[in-house]
């Protein structure tokens, strides 16, 4: 292990990590928004829209992210839609993640006893108020473990962005290995920087889950 190679490469990996984080968290935010909207639409069985979102979920849950990225980056320009590799990255991640987030949020919503909705409606609340003030806060609490797991999954999936020339961590590692052949050093740095990205999410998710469980059950 050549520590001189490692020390010289850290700034390059740091820049790549920042880009990975940027694309990754934009994708996570988009996935959360899509997942929440689609979960509510499917739960209330809104005509036409619920069918569209169910088809979307099945397509994106059952195809690899790499294929979705290739479609966005290589196929869309054929019909005149040109978007940058970075946008393709967070858009693909958001669409894939939205299909998983949708199921996580929907399971949380369906875990709420229907009596709570009926009681809130009897007090004069509208369906919108019931969803915002009664159902969603509890549903998000129930969905926290799956939500955190999906975030970690999506951040790890950023490793395929190098296939569309996004200069993320994986792209940087492969590029340096191809140039200098210090495979062990560059792969070790890759592992370390992914741990820097993912470990805080895992730890914070565990803490949040315990606090929400204590708030709900007192134990």
Image (cartoon, grey):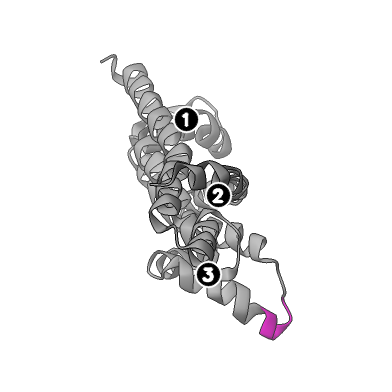
Disc 1 versus disc 2: nearer the observer: 2
Find the magenta span and give its range: 77-81
Q: Tag on residue 163?
A: 3
Q: Tag on residue 24?
A: 2
Instruction: Please provide percent x and percent y for residue 205.
Output: 40, 31
Camera-nearest residue between 214 and 208: 208
Element type where label 3 sits in the image: helix
**What residue is shown with label 1?**
137
Residue 72 found in image quarter: bottom right
- Name the quarter where the C terminus is drawn: top left
Tell me how far mark 1 sits from mark 2, CA to CA: 25 Å
Judged from this view, the residue extending furthest toward the bottom is 78
Local crowd size for mark 3, using a 10 Å CA cut-off: few (<14), some (14–19), many (≥20): some
Instruction: Please provide percent x and percent y for residue 54.
Output: 44, 64
Element type where label 2 sits in the image: helix
Local crowd size for mark 2, using a 10 Å CA cut-off: few (<14), some (14–19), many (≥20): many
């Amino acid at each position: 292990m050549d520590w001189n190679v490692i020390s010289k490469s850290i700034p390059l990996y740091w820049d790549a990590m920042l880009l990975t984080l940027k694309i990754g968290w934009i994708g996570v935010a988009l996935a959360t928004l899509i997942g929440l909207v689609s979960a509510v639409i499917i739960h209330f069985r809104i005509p036409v829209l619920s069918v569209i979102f169910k088809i979307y979920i099945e397509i994106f849950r059952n195809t690899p992210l790499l294929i979705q990225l290739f479609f966005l980056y290589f196929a869309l320009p054929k019909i005149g839609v040109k978007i940058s590799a970075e946008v393709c990255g967070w858009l693909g991640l958001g669409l894939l993640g939205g299909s998983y987030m949708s199921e996580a949020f929907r399971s949380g919503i369906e875990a709420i006893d229907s009596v709570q909705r009926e009681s809130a409606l009897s007090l004069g609340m509208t369906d919108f108020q019931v969803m915002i003030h009664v159902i969603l806060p509890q549903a998000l609490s129930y969905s926290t473990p799956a939500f955190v797991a999906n975030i970690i999954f999506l951040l790890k999936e950023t490793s395929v962005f190098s296939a569309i020339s996004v200069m993320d961590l994986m792209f940087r590692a492969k590029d340096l290995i191809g140039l200098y052949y210090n495979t062990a050093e560059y792969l070790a740095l890759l592992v370390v920087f992914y741990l820097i990205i993912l470990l805080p999410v895992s730890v914070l998710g565990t803490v949040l889950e315990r606090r929400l469980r204590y708030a709900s059950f007192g134990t």
